[in-house]
Structure formats: C-alpha cells, structure tokens
Amino acid sequence: MQFRHEVKHEISNHDMLILRQRLRAVMKPDSHAVNGKYEIRSLYFDNLDDKALREKLDGVSIREKYRIRLYNNDKSQICLERKYKCGGLGYKTSVNLTPKQAQAVADGDIGWMAASTDEVIINFYMCARNEGLRAKVIVDYTREPFVFASGNTRVTMDYNIRTGMGCTDFLNPACVTVPIEGAPCILELKWDDYLPDVIRGAIQLEGRHSAAFSKYAACRMYD
C-alpha cells in the first residue's frame, strides 16, 4: 500500500495561465495527454445515506469512495477505482472493466461481481450489497497533467467541470452535462516522500491556500 501526499488549491483562470507556463518550463506533460490535456468522465457511487458525500462535507479524515472512470471516451480503458483518504494522504486501487461490465455496474447489476477474485470488485460488491451503494452522478472535466521524476511528483489542473445532474448513463456520449457554478479551476499536487523545491516554487501563488474541494460534492449539489 503506497500512500501519497495530496494537496488541492482552487485557483482562478488567470492563475492557471501563469501556472501553465511555469509548469511547462520545469515538468513534462503526462504521456497519456493529447495536446497537453485529456477529457475525464467519472461516475461516482454512494450509499443510501450518502456516506461519501456527508463525510467529505463534514471533513471526516478517514474515508473512501468508488467511481468508474473513462479517459477521452476510450471505452477500451475503463477503470473501477477505490479512492482511500487519510488526512492529507491518499492511495488508489483500480481494476479494468469491459464496457459491458461498466454498463452493468452503472445500471445496478452487480450479481456478476460475486464470482470475481479482484479485491476492488469484491469490496465494491460488498458495499453495494450491505450499504446500498449505487450510481449517483456523472462528473466531466478537462485535465492538464504534468509529471516530474523526483518524488514521483504529479501536478494537474482541472477545469471545465460539468455535472450530469440526474443522468448516470455513463457510456452514453449524448448524456447532457452542464457547468457547475463558479467555473472553478483546481490545482492538485501529488507526491511520494518529498515535494521537490523546484516544483514547490513553481506552484507558489500569493494568497492561495490549500482547500478541500471535491468535484464529486460540487456536482452533487445539483441533485
């Protein structure tokens, strides 16, 4: 289990323009990016009591959530992810799903999961059976990712965040999503044992502080 440091900052569009130039000077674009960015669609799950949402809003230190994620509408690379947070540390485990499996999970058809030997699938299945875990909201956004070898450092800027509101038809490209209020940009840093000074210096913005922003929580406000 490899925990990583995770810090988020909500920034302005002007901040993003400044940081984009700084980061390009000292970091490399993620190899999966196309023209420096990619589109992400996530389908988030929560239980009958909205446990993941409530724990996030209440600032609970130790929590987990599940989501299905798709990059650039590439249905050959769909992942079921379990994200675990403990204070400012986090780790993620994932498993690939076929489009048929992803659609089944989105529709609440989880019976096939009982025969799996994958830990992520089994844990999801148990939560779905015991707590009523089900699809809640689609979250779309654009990501600009940068990487730096030292410290296994990763910096991303997320923007154009959109919510599917009541639509959970994850694989339907015609599912309408709308921008969330305020059109925020989110700067996120992740690193292992240390954050290199050159990266620490590059992301400095006067008057900006880390913030517990959640794209999932922001998009759930439109239920």
Image (spheres, helix red, strand yellow):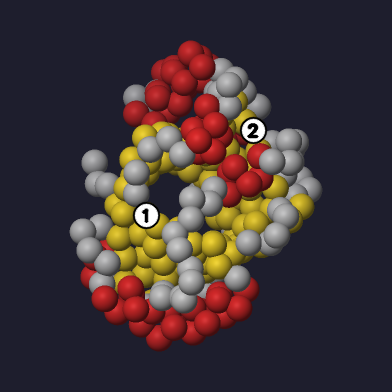
Q: On screen, 144 above or below 201? A: above
How many angstroms separate mark 2 from mark 1 (CA)? 24 Å
Q: On screen, 4 above or below 216? A: below
Tally of numbered discs: 2
Q: In the image shown, does 191 or 57 lie closer to the viewer?
A: 57
- Residue 90's disc is none
Q: Please report the residue visible at 69 percent of the width from the left and 41 percent of the height from the top.
A: 221
Q: In the image shown, does 197 or 205 lie closer to the viewer?
A: 205
Q: Quadrant of the C terminus?
A: top right
Using residue 101 as the reference point, say whether residue 152 is left or right of it: left
- Residue 136's disc is 2
Q: Please report the residue visible at 46 percent of the width from the left and 75 percent of the height from the top.
A: 205
Q: On screen, 185 above or below 110? A: below
Instruction: Please state which amino acid type lies under the numbered disc 2.
Output: Lys
Instruction: Please state which amino acid type lies under the numbered disc 1.
Output: Glu
Residue 84 image point, x, y percent = 38, 38
Residue 137 image point, x, y percent = 66, 38
Tell me if residue 101 can be seen. Answer: no
Residue annotated with mark 1: 6
Q: Secondary structure under badge 2?
A: strand
Q: On screen, 114 above or below 146? A: above
Q: Please report the residue visible at 64 percent of the width from the left and 52 percent of the height from the top.
A: 140
Residue 128 image point, x, y percent = 51, 20
